Image (cartoon, rainbow, N blue to C red):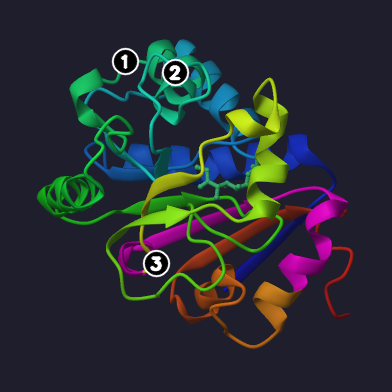
């Protein structure tokens, strides 16, 4: 476990972008697992800048996203497919067919899960998985208590997650109650994990996740058992780490 402490969000994003860039340069056909939310936006902006300068080529990269709200299609502004197109895919030279996000419009959960498992397996393993973490310790949409052995899951969002994510919707009632997510098993099989966290709000849970017991109550705590994980966080997020 490598821990990198940064001054602020900007520096966290730059350091994380360096790791993603190195991966893309070293292996131009890498499979990269991606996340949405506020945490990776700075990192995506830097990747776009480097692409525009001619320093990064995404033409052979394949991506697989962590999750999608059940019930939202790619043209819904709050869907994760829409987010990815907006912040990254439409701004770089990745062929859109190389990008994968669970199908939020698939009503049959079992089918959606089976389809995404098939896609992930067909990619032949994730080289680098980017992760953020929810205020309750979730990774992807693996909420506290989600079984650890799933490749892909359909999960029910906890009230804490609905509360945290309502900022993106007109009102709380509009936040979907379920999501499709890459499961902990798939995340743990990624060759490398890049975990980013910022802000004081997550200080307590990130300290518990990496310095407390491994427990399904804090899904991110399982990451202590991964053999190639880099955690990049700003001072505020690391403020409750043991000295
Ligand atoms: C998003 C995802 C989530 C977020 C987490 C943190 O694809 O998988 O686990 O990483 O909810 O979100 P932010 O970065 O908005 O605090």
Residue at figure coordinates x 64%, y 49% from the top left = 161
Q: Is residue 226 left or right of residue 5?
A: left
Pinpoint residue 20: horizontal percent, then vertical percent: 46, 42
What secondary structure is marked by label 2? helix
Disc with the residue nearer the chain's start (3 vs 1):
1
Q: Earlier in the sequence, mark 1 or mark 2?
A: 2
Q: Residue furthest bottom?
A: 213
The segment highlighted magenta reads 185-207
Marks 1 and 2 sit apart, C-alpha to C-alpha, by: 8 Å
Q: Which residue is mark 2?
A: 51
Question: In the picture, which quadrant includes the C terminus?
Answer: bottom right
> Which image quadrant for residue 224?
bottom right
Question: Disc 1 vs disc 2: Cβ atoms closer than 8 Å?
Answer: yes
Q: Residue at x 41, y 38 (%)?
A: 68
Q: Residue at x 40, y 74 (%)?
A: 147
- Identify the residue under disc 1: 93
Q: Is residue 11 above or below residue 195?
A: above
Respond yes or no on whether mark 2 lies under 8 Å from ligand 1. Answer: no
Q: Residues within 10 Å of mark 3 (few under 14, many from 20)?
A: many
- Mark 1: secondary structure: loop
Q: Foreground residue, 51 or 139?
A: 139
Can you say which quadrant of the picture contains the N terminus? bottom right
Q: Quadrant of residue 150?
A: bottom left
Q: Which residue is mark 3?
A: 184
In-front residue for pair 20/37: 37
38 displayed left or right of 219: right
Is residue 194 on the magenta stretch? yes
């Amino acid at each position: 476990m490598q821990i990198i402490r940064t001054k602020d969000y900007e520096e966290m994003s730059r350091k994380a972008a360096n790791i993603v860039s190195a991966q893309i340069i070293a292996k131009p056909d890498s499979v990269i697992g991606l996340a949405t939310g506020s945490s990776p936006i700075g990192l995506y902006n830097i990747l776009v800048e480097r692409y525009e300068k001619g320093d990064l080529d995404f033409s052979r990269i394949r991506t697989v996203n962590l999750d999608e709200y059940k019930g939202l299609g790619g043209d819904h502004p709050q869907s994760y497919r829409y987010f990815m197109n907006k912040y990254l895919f439409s701004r770089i030279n990745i062929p859109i067919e190389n990008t994968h996000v669970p199908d939020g419009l698939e009503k049959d959960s079992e089918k959606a899960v089976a389809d995404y498992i098939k896609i992930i397996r067909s990619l032949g393993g994730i080289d680098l998985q980017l992760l953020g973490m929810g205020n309750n310790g979730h990774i992807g949409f693996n909420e506290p208590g989600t079984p650890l052995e799933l490749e892909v899951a359909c999960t029910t969002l906890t009230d804490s997650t609905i509360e945290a994510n309502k900022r993106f919707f007109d009102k709380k009632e509009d936040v979907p109650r379920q999501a499709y997510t890459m499961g902990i098993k798939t995340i743990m099989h990624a060759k490398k994990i890049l975990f980013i966290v910022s802000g004081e709000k997550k200080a307590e849970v990130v300290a518990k996740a990496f310095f407390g017991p491994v427990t399904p109550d804090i899904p991110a705590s399982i990451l202590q058992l991964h053999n190639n994980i880099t955690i990049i966080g700003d001072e505020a997020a690391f403020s409750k780490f043991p000295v």
